[in-house]
Amino acid sequence: MLVFSIVLFAPVSAEVDDLVAERIDLFQRQSVIIDHERLVGNVRAQARREGVIVRVPQLFIYLYDHSGSWHLDGFRRGFERELNLTVKRERRARTMVRLDRLLGNVTDPAGDDIEIADLPAGDVFILLYRRQGCDECERVEQAVGQWLSEATDLSPVWIDVWMDRRPEG
């Protein structure tokens, strides 16, 4: 049983890398982090509608045309089923933050701005807001990785948005 638990919650970054067309590391601007931490109210709704990121993990899914499709705050067991139905049916979320707004709050590793035009083409864009050492973030990554392993017809672009320093490794 112990071996199963270790495998179940082990980071799957290498496995996810094999499933995605491209994996990109971006970093939330420190000034944006400070501004978001000062806001009060329903942080889950603010994350979905306005891109206010206070806690992680936050998972945003955008379709091939960059339209918002799905959002997850934290980790919820079995969320992959709902995610799969939403993406397969190309459902759009009416009250979800636009991708260009999220990209306006991040930089690449060199500190440069990122725009939608800078992103590679893909069928689905996966943005996972995370911190180093975040077990819940790893669980979300693992669950999305499992979903991608079954959704072989998709060409995903995975974007990790780090809320802290660049991950080691």
Image: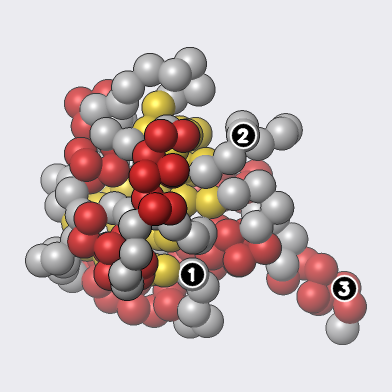
Exactly how many numbered labels are in the figure? 3
Question: For mark 2, does the 10 Å Cα neighbourhood hold few (<14), some (14 to 19), or many (20 or more) residues?
Answer: few
Circles 3, 1 touching at the beta carbon (< 8 Å): no
Q: Earlier in the sequence, mark 1 or mark 2?
A: 1
Residue 121: image x %, image y %? 26, 34
Q: Which residue is mark 2?
A: 165
Residue 52: numbered disc: none
Question: Is 116 on the left-hand or right-hand side of 36?
Answer: left
Q: Nearer the viewer, residue 132 or 66?
A: 132
> Going from the N terminus, do you reach mark 3 or mark 1 first?
3
Rendered residue at 10%/66% (across/down): 94
| 3 vs 1, front mark | 1
Dot 3: element: helix
Label 1 to label 2, Cα distance in Å? 20 Å
Badge 3 is on which residue?
A: 3
Q: Amino acid at mark 3?
A: Val
76 relative to 47, above or below = below
Q: Quadrant of residue 50?
A: bottom left
Q: Is residue 14 left or right of residue 157?
A: right
- Mark 1–mark 2 CB contact (< 8 Å): no
Considering only vertical position in the picture, is 149 above or below 100? below
Q: Which residue is mark 1?
A: 74
Please report the residue visible at 87 percent of the width from the left and 83 percent of the height from the top: 1
Query: Relative to the observer, which residue lies in front, 59 or 49?
Result: 49
Q: Which label sits in the foreground, 2 or 3?
A: 2
- Does label 2 or label 3 sit earlier along the sequence? 3
**Dot 3: within a 10 Å radius of its alpha carbon, few (fewer than 14), some, or many (20 or more) residues?**
few
- In the displayed structure, would residue 53 be above or below residue 88? above
Query: On the picture, is 85 further left or further right than 3?
Result: left
Q: Residue furthest right?
A: 2
